Image (tube, helix red, strand yellow):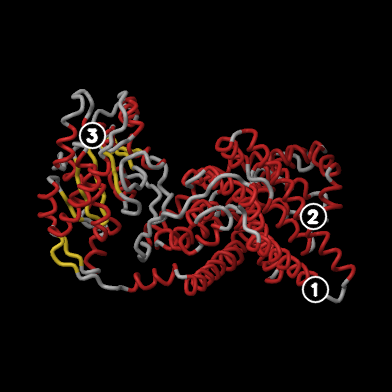
Amino acid sequence: MVNKHYQQEGVTGKNIVLVGNPNVGKSVFFNYLTGRYTDVANFPGTTTNVICGRCGQDAVTDTPGIYGVSSFNEEEKIARDIVLHGDILVNIVDAVHLERDLFLTQQLIDTGLPVLVVLNMMDEAQQQGIKIDIRVLSELLGVPVIATVAVEGKGMDQLKEAICRARAGRRLPPVQEKMAGLPADIPDPEKLLILEGDPVVSARHGMAPGGDRELIYGARRRWVNELVAMSVKETSRKEVWSTVLSRWMIQPLTGIPLLILTLWALYQLVGVFVAQTVVGFTEEILMGQYFQPAVKALVGRMVAPESAFNQILVGNFGVITMTVTYLLGLLFPLVLGFNLVLALLEDSGYLPRIATLLDRVLTSFGLNGQAVIPLVLGFGCVTMALMSTRLLGSERERRIATIILALTVPCSAQLAIIATMLAGLGPGYAIVYGLIIVSVFMAGGLLLNRFVSGQSTSLWIDLPPLRLPKPGNVLKKSWMKSYEFITEAAPLFALGALCLGLLEVSGALNAIENALVPLTVNWLGLPKEAAGGFIMGVIRREFGTASLFSFPMSDVQKMVALTTITLFVPCIASAMVIYKERGWKEGTAIWLGIMMVAFFIGGLINQLLNLFTTTLPAASPLTMLAGVIILGLAFLLGIHWLKPAK
């Protein structure tokens, strides 16, 4: 486990484990102790992976947010195994929610391991009139307790010294009594879990799970209530602005307008300012007027301009020109802008409230509000979102979410390019495009809910407090995510450009384009060169999207191309995750099915627009198409509601 990993690297110190409920700030403490950046957010699901680092000679492990050490879900199983191999447990507690968080604290103390309790977010507790007597709380628990405001660095200077003072605390009398009846060769932490009925730990020792969970949990809850009563000397909770706003965000009457207003503001920032103004400067001026001419001239001095090698380096699909222009001139500012927006939503605590608001809607698709986690993460990276479907409560939900993600959710890089193209087409095309994607999302969800077997689960999600995002954290997170994207995507983009360049100079690209004419030209109504974009879309969807617009097309063709490439199969990395999570048989069925749906929808849109243009030339084809989409979706919704699935 963790200790073994660090022993292999020569680390002989202690194994420090950070443990706490979701959204208490563990990642900030991990970053402080190790000097390593990690994803810091108030969005459940962002710290699912286990992260390890070093603090001097000690190993530091950050765990997923949990409410207890047990086997109730994947996060608790991971945290359980890490805690069992820990030497010191640093328990991060939300000072505003002591009644909730101290339950886990007492369970950690009952393991018998050395514990340090860190009361974080003390500023928010004070704002709400909560005064905590830290000395009394420390005496009652039997372990050291310190107070911090981690995001502002307050109290962090005493953290490392306090870790050295961590010690075993006061076990509950029923726990102490029950442990005495178990074999002495079983470690105390595992004795506790056996008593609480953990099947995995019990099986390790050839024992049946204990039946004392209710007894221990009841005693622990009563003791925590007493702890709060004795250590919180004065409580006068104030209804601050965040409480009122939080209530508005989860009520449909006020939450939906707030969500629409938020999405409009995000579109103005990313889709208008970044996609048009910033990208217009970086791509057209920096890259188009300065970088590309300079590189072509430099390469032209060393390689004959008419040679195949020159075409591969700086031609239409040049490894140098196309890769650098798309990565730095187009994608980097767009991805940075999107990650900035996502970081603001995460750190403010708004995303879990969106999950609560949309729970009823997602229930119609066989999901619950927690599916917002992978869906929103998908707009950052579909590959990451597909892995986060493990958070969903049933196999049925994971299957539905995987298909919807792979079919209808574009990643940040692709979405950024789409926003740029739609901004150039105008609001009419943007509205129709949005209607198409939303309709496919809803129709797919309704159909999957009807035909996918199994049972879905109810929503259980933690609502962190609303707070103003910290500029430093938002900027650091946005930059790191964008930098990681560029470093990961650069070799794939270069490889894609090389493949296209080789296909072009060898004539194979033209042969493929000719072979796909019945699909791309006759059915989709696109130039035959569009086949190259779809080929590259298999490698990276954003690369394929960008490639589709490297040759002239009409506005209608651009919208058909955007629709098709949005619904097109996910990139290789996402496809590999689908295969890993769903298996080769089901993964292949999903992959082929998505490709067929994408080409069918794209071709259907093209045929309908041509039909409306030919038969009703006086009417607006876009308006008629929008009407057909809305009527079709209304019909499907009517069938769903009038005849619910059994």
Graded by Cα atoms within 10 Å as few (under 14), some (14 to 19) or many (20 or more), the crowding at tag 3 reads some
C-alpha span from label 1 to label 2: 19 Å
279 above or below 184? below
Residue identifier under label 1: 620
Question: Can residue 374 be spotted in the picture?
Answer: yes
Q: Where residue 87 is drawn, which disc sits there?
A: 3
Viewed as shown, does residue 215 lie left or right of 602?
Answer: left
Viewed as shown, does residue 61 lie left or right of 189?
Answer: right
9 above or below 75? above
C-alpha span from label 2 to label 3: 61 Å
x%, y% of residue 624? 78, 70
**Labels 1 & 2 near each other (Cβ < 8 A):** no
**Labels 2 & 3 near each other (Cβ < 8 A):** no
C-alpha span from label 1 to label 3: 70 Å
Graded by Cα atoms within 10 Å as few (under 14), some (14 to 19) or many (20 or more), the crowding at tag 2 reads many
Figure quadrant of residue 85: top left
Amino acid carrying label 3: it is Asp
